[in-house]
Amino acid sequence: MTTSNIKRFDELTGQILGALYESFPVPRHLLLKDLFPDGLSFDDFVGFDVPNEQGEFLFACIDWLAESGYLRFKEKVQASGYAECVLTAKGLEVLKATPDSLSTESSLGDQLVDATKTGAKGLIGDLAGQALSIGVKFATTHLGLPG
């Protein structure tokens, strides 16, 4: 069974946001080899590991999260990851939220950290989807747009 791009995006986004929430406010490196070891493949032509299609997908997720204002980074290191990543104010605010639909008082960020440690991919994806939905509502409310 092939996982849809949205499901893959949500799962990876959850891992990324959970890692940054856990280290906040201290910046951390988001390295492909740590987040998604299957995202690297040995390239005979260049003689070392390079991002494969899965690795490029992870990079696209991080780029999108940065462009959408959830995180920032100091530098993209082409074949390995991102240096000095940290949540933005928007990213932190979203992860500190506790949605009414959840039967717990833990924030989304705390739940993402816990789910990441236990490897619950489905839960990670669900929590990331909720976080992004809150981010959209947060943005539309603060911009005066209908939400």
Image (cartoon, helix red, strand yellow):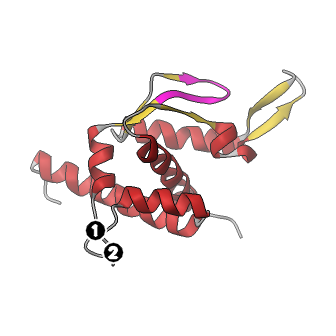
Please state the horizontal and vertical placement of residue 71, each as a whole percent of the image.
39, 37
Left or right of residue 17: residue 92: left
Q: Outermost residue, bottom direction?
A: 103
Q: Nearer the viewer, residue 127 or 44?
A: 127
Does the magenta segment cover residue 78?
Answer: yes
Magenta stretch, main secondary structure class: strand
Locate the N terminus and report the quarter of the image it occupies.
bottom right
Regarding residue 4, the answer to whether it shows in the image is: no
Report crowding for label 1: few under 14, some 14 to 19, many 20 or more residues within 10 A (C-alpha).
Answer: some
Residue assigned mark 1: 99
Q: Is mark 2 on a helix, strand or loop?
A: loop
Boundaries of the magenta span: 76-84
Q: Nearer the viewer, residue 120 or 66?
A: 120
- Rendering quarter of residue 120: bottom right
Q: What element carries label 1?
A: loop
Q: Identify the residue at image location x=33%, y=38%.
A: 69
The amino acid marked with disc number 1 is: Pro
Residue 102: mark in rendering: 2
Does the magenta segment cover residue 64?
Answer: no
Callout 2 touching callout 1 (CB < 8 Å): yes
Q: How far apart are marks 2 and 1 (CA)?
A: 6 Å
Q: Outermost residue, left direction?
A: 144
